[in-house]
Amino acid sequence: MRPLLIIFLLVTCARAYAIRPEYVSSRTFVERECATNSTPQGERIFVVGCGEKAKVFADIFHFRQGITLREIIDQTSLKGKLVHVMILRPEARTSHDFIRVGRSEKPRCRIKALDVIWLYDFKPEDIDL
């Protein structure tokens, strides 16, 4: 009975971990997809999104003091939609929780240079792997 419980817990943890993106691989993906982007290395914000019908997009935005999450969302194909956001930071070992951003909401989330921002137009916890 105990080995079955351990296997069950390992499978459950693996599924939960697979949903959460990781900073280094996310940033590498965006840099590869946007190889011609000329934004200076230290002034980048990496954006990855999953839109309707699982269309994935990637972009690099120029960081400036005071840039808001709403400004970033409005520059993507998810403008005007309910979006679930996850911000990954290079210094953080774990990812942040998802932030739900309504169509006109302006969350007080502080964006930093080199952040990786994941945008979803669906609730990521609902993904069935």
Image (spheres, grey):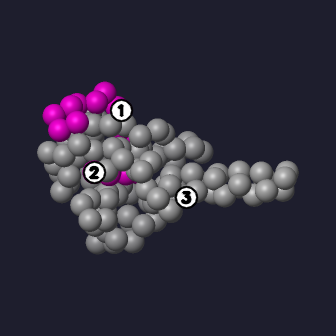
Does residue 44 show up? no
Report the residue at 42% width, 51% height from top: 126
Percent x, y of residue 89: 48, 45
Report the residue at 28% width, 30% height from top: 107
Percent x, y of residue 82: 23, 43
Frontmost residue, 46 versus 53: 53
Q: Are marks 2 and 1 in contact (CB under 8 Å)?
A: no
The kind of residue tagged 3 is Ala
Say what secondary structure mark 3 lies in.
Answer: helix
Say what secondary structure mark 2 lies in.
Answer: loop
Q: Answer with mark 2 or mark 3, whichever residue precedes in sequence.
A: 3
Residue that badge 1 annotates: 110
Q: Quadrant of residue 35?
A: bottom left
Q: Are marks 1 and 3 in contact (CB under 8 Å)?
A: no
> Gap between marks 2 and 1, in whole Å?
21 Å
Does residue 120 show up? yes
Percent x, y of residue 118: 37, 51
As drawn, the label of residue 121 is 2
- Magenta stretch in the rendered image: 102-121
Say what secondary structure mark 1 lies in.
Answer: loop
Residue that badge 3 annotates: 18
Percent x, y of residue 77: 18, 56
Q: Is residue 114 above or below residue 27?
A: above
> Gap between marks 1 and 3, in whole Å?
26 Å
Frontmost residue, 83 versus 72: 83
Few, some or many residues within 10 Å of mark 1 (<14, 14–19, 20+): few
Q: Are marks 2 and 3 in contact (CB under 8 Å)?
A: no
Give the left or right position of residue 73, taking residue 14 as reference: left
Report the residue at 47% width, 59% height from top: 128
- Which callout, 2 or 1, points to the residue nearer the camera? 2
Report the residue at 17% width, 38% height from top: 103
